[in-house]
Amino acid sequence: MTDISRLIQLQKYFRSGATRSVSFRKAQLRQLKSAILQHEEEIYEALAKDLKKSKEESWVTEIGLVIAELNTAIRHLHTWMQPEKVKTNLVNFPSKSRIYAEPLGVVLIIAPWNYPFQLLLNPLVGAIAAGNVVVLKPSEFAPATASVMEKIITEIFPEEYILYIQGEGAAVLQPMMQDFRFDHIFYTGSTTVGRHIYKMAADKLVPVTLELGGKSPCIIEADANLKVAARRIAIAKFSNAGQMCVAPDYVLIHESVKEEFLQQLKIVIEKFFTKDPLHSYNYGKIINEKQFNRIQQYVASGTVVHGGRYDKEKLYIEPTILTGVKISDPVMQEEIFGPVLPVIGFQDKEEALNIIQQNPNPLSLYIYASGSNTIHYWLQNIPAGGVCVNNSSWHITNHHLPFGGRGNSGIGQYHGRFSFDTFSHRKAVMKTPTWFDPAIKYPPFKGKLKLFKKIIK
Ligand code: NAD
C-alpha cells in the first residue's frame, strides 16, 4: 500500500467517527500506558544506546513524563470533553452558547532525536485524547528508540488509527505533505526545518504547532544564591550532554559575582559527573558525529575555564565552561545544543538586555535573583516562551503550565490540558429557540438605529 493510500485510510477511519467517544479515547490511552510499562526495560536499553541515558534520567525526562501526561489525560478527559457553557449577549437573547471541543482529523507529529521518546509520545497523548487519528514520525537519528516505539505502537494500534512511519525526514514527509492535506502538523525540532515545514503547510493552509529551539539565556544577578544557582544550572545544562531544547544556552552574570559563581559551578560539575565524566553513570554522549563536530568547534571560541576534553570515537565532550567569548562568535550566535556553557559578565542590566535581544523570544528564560524588583524587571523585559525564577528547565515538567515558544522559538503550546486544546478545534455553537422572534431583527430597518445603538454596544 502506498503512503498516500495509507493516509486516506486514516482519514476514512476518522470520518467513520470511531475515535469520537470518551470510552474509545480512554481505552486507547490506557492501552498505551500499559504497553509503555510493559516495554519499560527495552525503552531504557534503547535510550542508553542512542544517548547513554541512565535509567533514572530516562524515567525523569522521558518515560515518566509520558506516564504523567497519560495519567492526567485519563483522569481529566471526561471534563475536558464537556462543552463549555458561555454567556450570550443581549442581541441574541434567548439563545444559549457553548464551545465544543472538536477533533481536528488526521494529525502529523514529527519528533527530534534528543528526547526521542517523550517528544513523540507526549504530543500523541494529546492527539488521542482529543479524538484524532495520527501519523507518527520519529527522528531517524535515535534509531534504537525509534524501533522500540514502533514495536509498542504497532502492537496496540491498527495502522488506520495510528500510523508509524520511519525514515529520513525530507524523503518521507515531503511527498506526503505535498499530496495529502493533514488537518494539523505538530513539529518539534530545529528552527530551520520548522520554517520549511511551515512553508509547506501554508501551501495547503494546514495549521501548525512548531516547538523549536534557540538560545535560552540564564541571568544571574548580584543578589542571587550562587550555590543554588550553580547546582540548578549545572544539572539543566549538562544532563543529556546539553542536548536539551530548554537547557540554559549561556550565562549572563553580574561581574561582581562572576568569579565566585565559576568556582561553585566547577565544584558541582565534578560532584555530579566526577573528575572523569566520560565514565560517569550520570553523563551522556553526543548523538552523532555531525553534532559532535559542530559542538566541538565552539570549544575554541573562548578561554576554557573548566573541561574542554573530548573523544570523537566515543562521541564525548566534557562539560565545558567558557569565558571571554565574543558576542559575534558562532557560539553566541547559534544555539549551542551541547555541553558548552559560555559565562559572560555584565555591569548593568542594559548591557545584558542588549545581548539577549540579539536572539529575541527565547524558548526559556532563567532568572537567578532575590530582589522582587529585579525579577520583575526581567519578567517584563524579555518576551519568552517560558520562565523559571531561581531554577532552570523544570517548568516543562509541570503539566499545569503550557509549554511552547514564541517568535523564532515556536508557535503554539502543549502539555496537559493545553495539549488537548492544541489538538482540538473550539467550535462555537449557538442554539436559538423559536418561541421568541422579535420583529426588530427584520426589515424594515428604517428608524431603528437608535434602538440598535442601545442594544449593540
Ligand atoms: P532532527 O534532525 O531529528 O529533526 C527533527 C525531525 O524533523 C525529524 O523527525 C526529521 O526526520 C524531520 N525532518 C528533518 N528535515 C525535514 C524536512 N526537510 N521535512 C520534513 N521533516 C524533516 O532534530 P533536530 O532538528 O536536529 O532537533 C534539534 C533541534 O530541536 C534543536 O534546535 C532543539 O532546540 C529543538 N528542540 C526543540 C524542542 C522544543 O520542545 N521546543 C524540543 C527538542 C528539541
Image (cartoon, grey):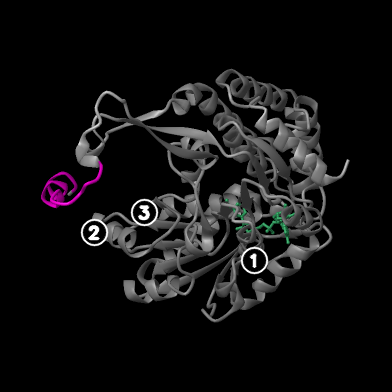
The answer to which image quadrant residue 127 occupies is: top right
Marks 1 and 3, the one that precedes in the sequence: 1
Residues in magenta?
A: 442-456
Assess disc 3: are there few (<14), some (14-19) or many (≥20) residues with their C-alpha within 10 Å of its C-alpha. some
Query: What mark, if any, has residue 235 been given in the picture?
Result: none
Image label count: 3
Marks 3 and 2, the one that precedes in the sequence: 3
Which residue does the image show at 58% across and 57% down from the upper left? 212
Q: Position of residue 421 (x, y in %)?
A: 48, 39
Q: Is 86 placed left or right of 146 in the picture?
A: left
Amino acid at dot 1: Thr
Q: Answer above or below: position of 242 versus 25.
A: below
Amino acid at dot 3: Asn
446 magenta-colored: yes
The answer to which image quadrant residue 214 occupies is: bottom right
Q: Position of residue 114 (x, y in %)?
A: 68, 51
Which residue is identified by label 1?
Answer: 192
Give the CA distance from mark 2 to mark 1. Answer: 37 Å
Taking depth in this image into account, of 1 and 290 the one nearest to the observer is 1
Which residue is identified by label 2?
Answer: 373
Assess disc 2: are there few (<14), some (14-19) or many (≥20) residues with their C-alpha within 10 Å of its C-alpha. few
